[in-house]
Structures are given as C-alpha cells and as structure tokens.
Image: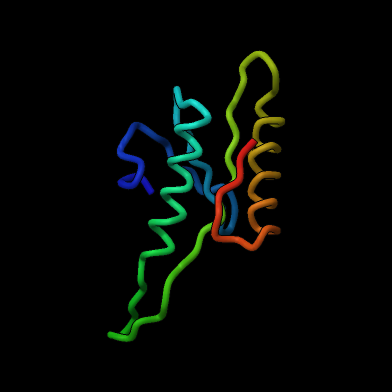
Amino acid sequence: MISHFDISINVYRYGGDEFAILIPKTQKEELSLLTESLVKKVRNHTIKYNNEQLGNMTVSCGYALYSYTAETLDEFIKHADEALYQAKERGRDQAVGH
C-alpha cells in the first residue's frame, strides 16, 4: 500500500483484516482517485502459491475526509467505517467515500 500511494502516508492495522491509511492534505477528488486506483491494482494482482495461480484478490475501501472544525476523531473513524461497510454491502471490490 505504501508503494502504491507514492506520497507521504501512514498505514495502520485497524482490525483483523482492516487497515487505516492516513493521507495528509488530500482533497476529496484526489482521495477518490487514489482509492479507486488501489482497488484496481489489487484486482489485477495475481497470487501464486507453490507455482499454482490462486486467482485475483479484491479489496473494499471506505474513505472519509477529516474536518478539524466539524467532527471529532471518533466521528471521523465512524464515517470511514460506514463507508467501508457500504462498499462491502454493494458487492465488495470497490471504494466508497464520505
């Protein structure tokens, strides 16, 4: 993930299979393009094990922009989490944002 974004980011494991990526000073349009690009890159990545192709992976992304004046950190995380579950409910393998 770090090499995909090619900008200064922080990646954190948030849960069992969930990660939080913090990208400073990003506008919504850029964030949308970055997450869509990550979904596509993961989809096109083939996994091999013992010289056998296992197929492609998928990823669901939920993203949110943090507003220092309009919300708390807990609300920000809640918005990103809600977006993630919307992506999963809509069939996975996509990015949804708030």
Looking at the rendered structure, the number of numbered marks drawn on it comes to 0
Looking at this view, name the residue that lies furthest to the left: 51
Residue at image location 41% in from the left, 48% down from the top: 37
Residue at image location 41% in from the left, 60% down from the top: 42
Residue at image location 61% in from the left, 45% down from the top: 96
Looking at this view, name the residue that lies furthest to the top: 69
- Give 23 or 37, whichever is nearer the viewer: 37
Q: Position of residue 1 (x, y in %)?
A: 38, 49
Q: Quadrant of residue 8?
A: top left
Q: Position of residue 98 (x, y in %)?
A: 65, 35
Q: Is residue 95 left or right of residue 89?
A: left
Residue at image location 30% in from the left, 46% down from the top: 3
* Placement of 52 over or under 92, stated as above or below: below
Q: Position of residue 34 (x, y in %)?
A: 43, 41
* Placement of 24 over or under 54, stated as above or below: above
Q: Is residue 29 left or right of residue 77?
A: left
